[in-house]
Amino acid sequence: MRIVDVRTHVLEAELDEPFGWSFDSTTKRGSCLVEIEVEGGLVGWGECFGPARLNAAVVAAFGKHLIGADAMAHDAIWLTLYNRFRDQGQKGLVVTAISGVDIALWDLKGKILGRPVHQIMGGPLRSRVQAYATGTYRRGSGDPMEYIVDEVRGYVDQGFEAVKLKIGFNVAEDAALIRAVRAAIGKDKGLMLDANHGYDALEAIALGQAVADQDIGWFEEPVVPDDLASYREVRQRQPIPVAGGECEFTRWGFLNVLTTRSIDILQPDTCAAGGLSECKKIADMAAAFGVRYVPHVWGTGIGLAAALQLLAVLPHTPPRHTPREPLLEFDRSEHPFRQAVLASPIEHKNGWVDVPAGPGLGIEVDRTAIQRFTVA
């Protein structure tokens, strides 16, 4: 089937309460959705990670290379787009835009064949995934030692077995908060840290050493993503496994991460690193290097559905006697249209999320909601 139209939808919504992390803050949530139509009117949906309006502009530039192409030839389309824009597009917006296109093509392929994406990617290794709660962002007022501790208690009460804590502000204060959160959730719950590259290497090492006794699952983005040498230094000089990868792109970018042994746990974002096609290649490569793969997930229910389809087919990494199952990042921060864009929202049940089993991504998009949140 030939592609006859490519449309983008830029969605934005103001937050009731702005929130921040180590290096930035936001008053709104935004997303760029990609809709690809083929002959006969069938459409597929994808999502791009990152600045919505900029992603939409890049997808528009792809148009002449997409119209008339065979929608089933997703690998050929991926390489065409990447090669055409390679000179200035090996990372960043070009690849995030390709990601949205690629996810939409997989959604189309599944609908054409009448199968969920995970079946045509090789068949599922799992039909549901354990989720961990992401939140704990900083508010404009109040004491984090109070409202964040209350927040993580709430996640445990909802059935989550693990939570991720935002740090990266001040080593001593962050260490105190980590200890308070551990005490609040108990010793049997998973606790991961995410500094959003707020530290330098020496600070990250000091933080890791200071909370080494708190049974931390991983230390995410301890330093800026460009500096793999500092990643290796942090990995070598403190005991917590180092995670990262939401700001890395394509098989070539992750090959460098893997061959330099810079990260213990890879976290590509399916809507950023190259889409489902590329992230499956990255996952297989990670398995060959014996490195865990836990996708970064941030966006609407469309991106969440794409991550779940990938999680269904992820190989067990690293190979071991008792397979370690991958985890789903389940964003709990305020997002007015995260679930609204879906006719049937994807929710957790006691911290577990089912992989959608319908054709394509397994979701139905609510066009009324998309129109409500679309900006000019």
Image: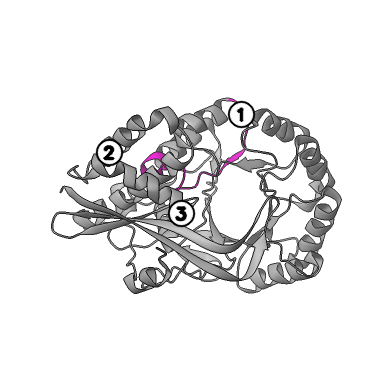
- In terms of sequence position, does the residue under pointer 2 or pointer 1 come before the other? 2
* Residue 85 located within the stretch drawn in magenta: no
Q: Residue 183 in the image: state x and y as whole percent.
A: 80, 64
Q: CA distance from mark 2 to mark 1?
A: 31 Å
- Residue 234, image quadrant: top right
Q: Residue 36 in the image: state x and y as whole percent.
A: 27, 54
Q: Residue 241 in the image: state x and y as whole percent.
A: 68, 41
Residue neighbourhood size for the residue with mark 1, other residues' Cα within 10 Å, grouped as few (<14), some (14–19), many (≥20): some
- What residue is rendered at 35% in x and 47% in y? 59
Q: Main secondary structure of the magenta part?
A: loop
Q: In the rendered view, would you say 293 is above or below 256?
A: below
Quadrant location, the C terminus: bottom left
- What residue is rendered at 40% in x and 72% in y? 372
Determine which residue is flagged by label 2: 77
- In terms of sequence position, does the residue under pointer 2 or pointer 3 come before the other? 3
Determine whether, in the image, residue 173 is placed left or right of residue 96.
Answer: right
Tell me the element at label 3.
helix
**Amino acid bearing label 1:** Arg
Tell me the element at label 1.
loop
Q: In the rendered view, would you say 225 is above or below 259?
A: below
Tell me the element at label 2.
helix
Determine whether, in the image, residue 63 is placed left or right of residue 160.
Answer: left
Using the image as rendered, state which of residue 265 and residue 206 is in the foreground: 206
Determine which residue is flagged by label 3: 52
Tag shown at residue 261: 1
Q: Which residues are magenta?
A: 260-279
Q: In the rendered view, would you say 94 is above or below 135?
A: above
Give the mark toward the camera: 2 or 1: 2
* Residue 272 located within the stretch drawn in magenta: yes
